[in-house]
Each structure stands twice: as structure tokens, then as C-alpha cells.
């Protein structure tokens, strides 16, 4: 197995660190570099919270939009049905309180006579 240049460098650094003998300045700089790298991993663009937020936020928006559209369609259909029921109720009430019998409205001659009369 042939090692890449990066792998060879990483192994040399690991051997050096295993042997110890770092100066206080080297140890401090190494600790700072480690903290910086860990901070970048925790708070960088690949942070788990960001990934979760980025993945479910569009899905939530889509679900909310679909629910809103479905609610509007169902509400509109309900409103239309209520309106038709109200109109039918008004027609039924007019027929029931009128002096003419219902059969008069079904007579073709009466319908022709109504259409020939001026509207008042």
C-alpha cells in the first residue's frame, strides 16, 4: 500500500507528538489550533443543527402552504354550498307564503304568461 504525502506527514507528526518534548509555546499553539478547528466544526456550515434546520424548514413551508391552499379550497366550497342552501331556502319560503299553489308554477301556460308580463 502506497501512502500519500499527506498520510506520511500525518504519521511523522503523530510520532513526534507521541514522543513528547514539545516546548510550552508549541503545546499552547497546538491547543489553540485544536480549539479553533473544533470551534469551526461545531459552528461551521456543516453544523448538525444547521443541517437539520435547512432540511426540515423547506418541508415545513411546503406543508404549511399545502394546508393553507386545502383550507381555502374547502372553505370556498363550504361557503358556496351555504350560499346555494340559503338561496334554495329563500325560494322555498317564497313558494310557501305565496297565494298561488305550487302547481301553478309548473304549468307551462302560467310560465309563458309570467314571462310576457313586465317586471315589477
Image (cartoon, rainbow, N blue to C red):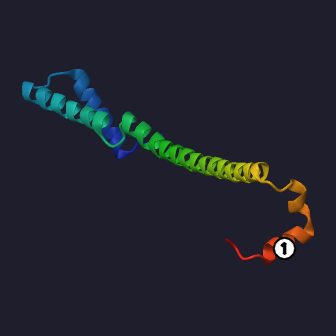
Q: Give the camera-side residue of 91 and 9.
A: 91
- The percent position of residue 1, horizontal first and vertical second, equals 48, 39
Taking 112 as reference, is 72 left or right?
left
Q: Residue furthest front?
A: 99
Residue at screen point 58% across, 45% down? 71
Which residue is the site of mark 1?
A: 113
SS class of the residue under badge 1? helix
Q: Relative to residue 51, is residue 31 depicted above or below?
A: above
Q: Give the camera-side residue of 77 and 7.
A: 77
Taking 68 as reference, is 115 left or right?
right
Residue at screen point 16% across, 31% down? 32
- The percent position of residue 120, horizontal first and vertical second, equals 67, 71
- The percent position of residue 47, horizontal first and vertical second, equals 35, 37
Residue at screen point 28% across, 36% down? 43
Q: Relative to residue 13, is residue 109 depicted above or below?
A: below
Total of numbered circles in the picture?
1
- The percent position of residue 82, horizontal first and vertical second, equals 66, 47
Residue at screen point 34% across, 45% down? 5
**Circle 1 crowding by C-alpha within 10 Å: few under 14, some 14–19, many from 20:** few
Taking 58 as reference, is 100 left or right?
right
Q: Give residue 99's quadrant in the image.
A: bottom right
Q: Give the camera-side residue of 80 and 8.
A: 80
Amino acid at each position: 500500500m502506497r501512502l500519500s504525502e499527506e498520510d506520511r506527514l500525518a504519521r511523522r507528526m503523530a510520532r513526534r507528538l507521541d514522543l513528547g518534548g514539545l516546548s510550552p509555546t508549541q503545546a499552547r499553539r497546538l491547543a489553540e489550533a485544536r480549539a479553533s478547528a473544533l470551534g469551526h466544526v461545531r459552528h461551521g456550515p456543516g453544523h448538525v443543527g444547521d443541517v437539520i434546520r435547512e432540511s426540515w424548514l423547506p418541508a415545513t413551508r411546503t406543508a404549511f402552504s399545502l394546508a393553507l391552499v386545502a383550507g381555502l379550497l374547502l372553505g370556498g366550497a363550504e361557503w358556496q354550498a351555504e350560499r346555494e342552501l340559503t338561496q334554495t331556502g329563500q325560494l322555498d319560503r317564497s313558494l310557501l307564503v305565496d297565494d298561488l299553489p305550487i302547481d301553478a308554477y309548473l304549468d307551462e301556460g302560467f310560465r309563458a304568461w309570467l314571462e310576457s308580463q313586465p317586471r315589477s
